[in-house]
Image (cartoon, coloured by chain):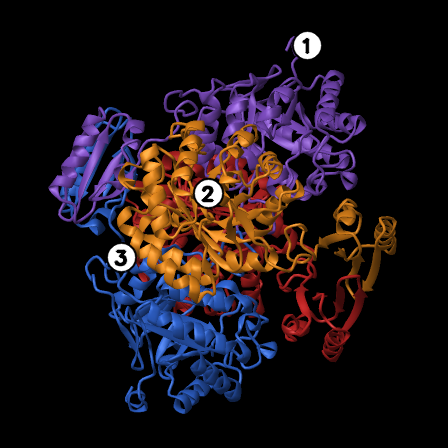
Chain colours: A orange, B purple, C red, D blue
Amino acid sequence: MVVVMAPEATEEDVDAVVRSVRAAGGDAFVSRGVSRTIVGLVGDVDAFDALNLSNRRGVLDVVRISVPYKLVSREHHPDRSVIRVGGVPLGPDTLTVIAGPCAVETPEQTLAAARMAQQAGAALLRGGAFKPRTSPYAYQGLGEDGLRILAEVREETGLPVITEVIDPGTVELVAGYADMLQIGTRNMHNFALLQAVGAAGRPVLLKRGFAATIEEWLMAAEYIAQRGNLDIVLCERGIRTFETATRNTLDISAVPVVQRLSHLPVIVDPSHSGGRRDLVLPLTRAALAVGADGVLIDVHPDPGTALCDGDQAVPPSGIPELADAIAILSPLMGRTLAQPAPRGHAAVR
Amino acid sequence: MVVVMAPEATEEDVDAVVRSVRAAGGDAFVSRGVSRTIVGLVGDVDAFDALNLSNRRGVLDVVRISVPYKLVSREHHPDRSVIRVGGVPLGPDTLTVIAGPCAVETPEQTLAAARMAQQAGAALLRGGAFKPRTSPYAYQGLGEDGLRILAEVREETGLPVITEVIDPGTVELVAGYADMLQIGTRNMHNFALLQAVGAAGRPVLLKRGFAATIEEWLMAAEYIAQRGNLDIVLCERGIRTFETATRNTLDISAVPVVQRLSHLPVIVDPSHSGGRRDLVLPLTRAALAVGADGVLIDVHPDPGTALCDGDQAVPPSGIPELADAIAILSPLMGRTLAQPAPRGHAAVR
Amino acid sequence: MVVVMAPEATEEDVDAVVRSVRAAGGDAFVSRGVSRTIVGLVGDVDAFDALNLSNRRGVLDVVRISVPYKLVSREHHPDRSVIRVGGVPLGPDTLTVIAGPCAVETPEQTLAAARMAQQAGAALLRGGAFKPRTSPYAYQGLGEDGLRILAEVREETGLPVITEVIDPGTVELVAGYADMLQIGTRNMHNFALLQAVGAAGRPVLLKRGFAATIEEWLMAAEYIAQRGNLDIVLCERGIRTFETATRNTLDISAVPVVQRLSHLPVIVDPSHSGGRRDLVLPLTRAALAVGADGVLIDVHPDPGTALCDGDQAVPPSGIPELADAIAILSPLMGRTLAQPAPRGHAAVR
Amino acid sequence: MVVVMAPEATEEDVDAVVRSVRAAGGDAFVSRGVSRTIVGLVGDVDAFDALNLSNRRGVLDVVRISVPYKLVSREHHPDRSVIRVGGVPLGPDTLTVIAGPCAVETPEQTLAAARMAQQAGAALLRGGAFKPRTSPYAYQGLGEDGLRILAEVREETGLPVITEVIDPGTVELVAGYADMLQIGTRNMHNFALLQAVGAAGRPVLLKRGFAATIEEWLMAAEYIAQRGNLDIVLCERGIRTFETATRNTLDISAVPVVQRLSHLPVIVDPSHSGGRRDLVLPLTRAALAVGADGVLIDVHPDPGTALCDGDQAVPPSGIPELADAIAILSPLMGRTLAQPAPRGHAAVR
C-alpha cells in the first residue's frame, strides 16, 4: 500500500500516518520528493484498510498494490484448481461442455434438450427451475416441479444437473436436487445468497455480474470461499456496454485475465453473451481458442416455442456443427473433452 | 407492438403471424412495402409477448411500443403520487431531505449524525445496520443492534427511520424497527428481495441499480407494486460509466425522465453518486434545481473515523452551507421543505 | 511517480531502475517491504515517462501521481481564468448564455434564432455552418455561405459568433468570420485540428468527447494551449453510457470536478446531453445550480422544419421560462449574467 | 420506417403525416389500435428522413427499420469482398496477418520488426510515422522520415506497407509512400479525413472508434465509399467499457456481426484491445476462431525501449508460438494464409 501525501501536507501529517501504521503492527517508509511525499506501507493490508488513511489530514490518495481477495487468488495458490461436479471435472486439462434449456418447461422438452446436449459433447446438464426475470409479468419457472424434472432427466441420461438459486431461503431445497448451484448475473452482488451457497455443500457456478469488474467478480467468489466452499467455477457471460447489436458484449479477454489472477476454472456462456442464435457457434469457437475451461450453451428442441430466451437457443439442426467445433478445437488446445462419470459414481453423490 | 418481417418472408409467414395474434385475442394490420412487410399489433401486449413472435419463421424483428410496466406507470395514473413515511410526505409539492450515517456504529455517533441531519433540514433519518459490502473483509454492520440504536434515536429526535434490507429472511425483522425499507443498488435486480418488501407493509426506498436502465429500474418497482405495495420512492444514485474521476456518474437527467414515466417520487443521492465529499454540495444544488422530490445525504460527526464510505460523508463543518442551499432552492422550485410529523403522530405508527 | 517491483524482482532489477532514474536527472527512494519493494521517484515526470519503466525487468506497475497536463492545470495557475469572446466574458463571476440554431439554414431563420437567443439572455450566438454528421447522407451545412449569414446576423444583433471547425484546412477561413471556434465532440481527439485551432488566434470552445475521460479532455485542451492559445472554454455535453432514454448522459459532476483541476471556464450543453426538448429547461437549471460558468442552448424558430437536431431545439414558446430560470438562478449563484459588449467593441475585433 | 403516433394524436395529425410521406414520393399504411395508431412507410428512407417526422405534432416516435448505410451493406452486395493491398488479398478465403512496430523509430528497428512480422506469417507491414497521442508531450512520430524508412523496408522485404494518416492535409503525402492508409480509432469520426482518404486512391484500413457502435463504424466506412473508394478493411480493436483490467474490451462478437451486415473484410487487433503483451496470443487465437479475415499485431525487436505502446508489443521470443497458432488455426477455419505477392508485382504498384 502506498500513501500519497498532498502538496500542503505537514511533517506532522506524515508522522501521524507513520505512527498509525506502526501502531497497527506494520511499517512505513517515507520518500520525500520536491513537491510530494510518499509513504510505502509494509504489513497486513486489511489492518491498514481499517485505518481509513484516505481520510487523514494531508493525505491525497491511498494506492492499493495487492489484490483484495485471497482464498481465490492465484498468489498463494499457484496451481489452477480442478472442480468436480457429480464426478465431472472442470479445470486446466479438460474442456467441459454444459448445455441444456434456459428454462425447464416439461419432462419431454427437458429430456430432448438433454439428449441434444449429449450430442453436442456435454457432460453436464443445465436447466432453470427458478428464473429471475426483469419483468414480473414474464415466465418465472416451474420451481420445485422443475427440480423434479431435472432429477428425473439426470436418472435417464446420467448427466449431473446444474440449476440456478435466486433466494437464500430456497438454497437448501435446490441443493437437495442439484449437483451444482448457479448464481446468475443479476445476483452476483447478492451477498446474502453468496453466503448461503457458500454453506450449502455443493459446487457453485458463479456468473459474472453484467456490470461487474473482474475484481468485483473475484470478490464475490471470495464471499463463497470464505464460508468454506472453494468448489467454484467462474462463468463469463457478457457485460453491458454501449453497443446494442448484441444483448451483451462478451468480454473474451476476461478468460486469460482471470486465469492469471485466480486458480478457479473459467468458462464462457456464448448464448447469453450475444443473445443471438447465429453467434453461438463463432463465440463458442472463440471461447475454446482463448483457453476457456468450458462453455455453457442454451439448447432447445423447438426454440420457436421456448418460454425463455428462445432467440438464442441452439435448435437440433445446429448441434452437429457445434459438436464438430468442440471435438476439433479441444485437443488443439491440449484438453480432453470431459465425460460424464460412469453411472455408479453419480449414484453415490 | 410492431412485427418487422424479413425480406425473404413469404405470404405464408405473414399469415402465420396474423393468425397467431388473432388467436391470442388481438388484431393485426399488415403494411406491405417494396422490400419489407410490417405487421402492427393491437391488443394485450403481454399475450403477444407469450407468442414468441421473434422466433417465428420470416420474422426479422419485433419492436415494442408501449412500456412494459403498468402499476408504476404514469400512463394510467397521471397524477404524481405522495408517499408518507412516518407521516413525512415525499411528492411533487415538497422537498424531503433524508440524511444520516452510512453505517450505524454507536448510539452516540448515530444520535450526533441525526442532529446534524436535522440541522441540514432533514425530516427522515437514514442509517445502515445491515451493510452490503463488495469485500467480505469489510465492515458488515451491527445487524439488529444497529436497528435498536436507530429506534432509540428516533425516540430521541422524532425522525422516522429508513434502513436497508439485504436478505428476504430478515425483512420482517427490519420492518419491525424501520419506518421505510431501503433496497440498495446491488439488490435492485434481487427479485426475491423485491417481492419480500412488496409484502412487508412498509414504504420502500428503491435505489437504482448502478448499471440498470431507467426501464429496468421501473420494472423493479413494478415487482414491489405487484405485491400490493405502491408506497415506493425511487432514488437515483449514479451509474457506472467509463469515467473514473467520480465513483459513479450521477445521471441527473433521470429525474425528469422518470417523473414523466412514473407517478412515483424520485430523489437523488449526491453522496454515493460522486463518492467525494467536495461534490455533495454542488450535486445537492443540481438535484434540487433539476426538480428532484428529495435528497439523501451521508453525514458523519467525524468522517475520519467512519467505518464505511467516510470519503463522502459531510462533516459538521459542512452542514450550514448545505442547509442554506436547501432552504433557498426549495421555495424557488415551488416546494415546501418537508418537516417531521409532530411527536404524537410518530408514536401511533 | 511510484514504481512497484514484482515479488520476484531482484536487487539488480531495483538497482537498474534507480540508476535509470538518476541518469535521467531525478532521484529515487527505495522502500523494501516483506513481499514487495516500492521505488518513489522525484523529478521530471516526462523524463521518467520516456524511460519506459513499466517494461523493465522486475517492474510490476508504474503509478503516476501527478496530472499529465500542465498549462491548463490549476496546480500552477490557482486562479480561475476569464476568457473573452468579442468582449463577452466567460469565467467565475459571470453566467454566460450561448444560444442559436444547431445549423444555419437561411438568413431569416438565423436572425430569428438570434433574437430568441437574446430573449433567453444570451450574449453569444452559436450556429453551425460546417456540420459533422454521422451519416454521409445527412445535411452537411451551408459552408462559407453559412459563415456569411452568421457575420450578417452579428452585424444586425451585436452578438459575437461561435461556429464549429471540422478540418484543419478550413480553420483559417472560419477564423476570418467567427469570434470563437468550436471543436465538436467527435473531434476532441482530432489532434491535427486541435493544433490548428491552437495557432488560429481565436478563442476555442472545446466540447468533451462523448467517450472521453475528464483527463483526456484536459489533455486535448493542453494540445491547444501548447500552441500558445490559452483562451479555451470547456463544454460538457453528455457522455455515452448504456442508458438509452437520453441521447447522452449529462455528466453534471464533471463541472465541479474540472473546475478543481483546471483554471479554464466550464459550460454545459443541456441540448445535446439529453437530446430531448423537454429536458433542456431542467438540465439548464441543474447546470446553473451545479456551478457552471455558462450554458449552450439550441434554439430554433420552427423546430419541426429544422434540418438538424430538431428534437432538442427550444421553440419560441419555451424561451420565457428559460429566460426566467436563468435570470433567477444566476444571482443566487453569485454570478452576473454576461452581456454583449457595446457595439463599438465588437467592431474593433 | 414506422411512425408511432402519440395516444393524444388526432386524425388530423395522422393525415398530416400520411400526406407528407406521399408528397415525398412514398406511401403510408395506417394501423389504428385501441390506444395508438401506427403508420408504416414505404419508399425512399432518405427522403423520409428529410421530413423530420419525429418533430410533427402527434408523433411519438419514428422507428427506422432498414440500415442507414448502403454501399458497404451486404443487403445489395451479398458476396463478401476481397480487397487487395500491394497484391495481398484480404477476404473470406484467406487469413491475412499484418504486423509491425507501433511506431517507426529507426531503419534498423523497423527492418528487424519486419523480419519478425514475416516469421509470424505476416504478408503486410504496418508501422506508424504520424502518431496520434493523447498527450501533447508524448512521442509524435518521425513524420515523412518514417515514411521513407517504411518504403526502404518494403524494398528490402517485399512487404507492402500500411501506415496511419491523421490529417487531411498530409493524406496525399502519405499515399505517395504507403500501399494502404490507416484511419485510427480516434479519427473514425473525423469526417474530413474519411472523405480525404476516400479520394486518395489507396485501400483504407478503418479502425473502429473506441466508443463507436457497429452501425456508426459502418457509417464511417460509407463516408469513404461515397467518394468512390470501396477498398476498405474494417479493424475491431477493442471498445471502452467500465472494465479496467484491460486497456480496452475486445468486442469479439463484432466480427461475425459485421460480416453479416457488410461485405467488407473484418480483422482484429489483439494488441491494442488488451494493451497487454500476455493477451496477444490468446486473443489472436480467439480472433482466428471467431472467423476474422486477419489480425494486426504489434511487434518490436526490443519492447523495453519502444517509444510507443511497448507494454503490448510482442518480443522476438513470442513470435514462434504466435506463428504456430496462426499456421494451425488458418486451415481449420478453411482459410489460406495470405502471402506477399512476388517482387515483380509490388514493383508495378
Answer with left or right where residue C147 lies relative to residue D24: right
Residue drawn where x is 44% and y is 55% of the image: C161
Q: Which mark is residue D82?
A: none
Q: Which residue is mark 1?
A: B347
Q: Say which amino acid is labelled 1.
A: Ala
Residue drawn where x is 31% and y is 88% of the image: D342
Answer with left or right where residue A176 lies relative to residue D14: right
Residue ranking furthest to the left: B11
Foreground residue, C121 or D89? D89
Q: Confirm whether residue B48 shows in the render.
A: yes
Q: Is residue B244 above or below residue B169?
A: below
Q: Which mark is residue A160?
A: 2
Residue ranking furthest to the front: A344
Would you call the spot at circle 2 few (<14 residues within 10 Å), some (14-19), or many (20 or more)? many
Foreground residue, B18 or C24? B18
- Chain containing the residue with disc 3: D
Q: CA distance from mark 2 to mark 1?
A: 56 Å
Q: Which residue is mark 3?
A: D69
Q: Where residue C249 sits: x, y (%)? A: 48, 45
- Chain containing the residue with disc 1: B
State which quadrant residue C15 falls in: bottom right
SS of the residue at dot 3? loop
Q: Are marks 2 and 1 on the same chain?
A: no
Foreground residue, D66 or D267? D267
Answer with left or right where residue A129 lies relative to residue B311: left
Q: Confirm whether residue C106 shows in the render.
A: no
Q: Say which amino acid is labelled 3.
A: Tyr
- Chain containing the residue with disc 2: A
Asked if marks 3 and 2 touch (Cβ < 8 Å), the reply is no
Q: CA distance from mark 1 to mark 3?
A: 67 Å
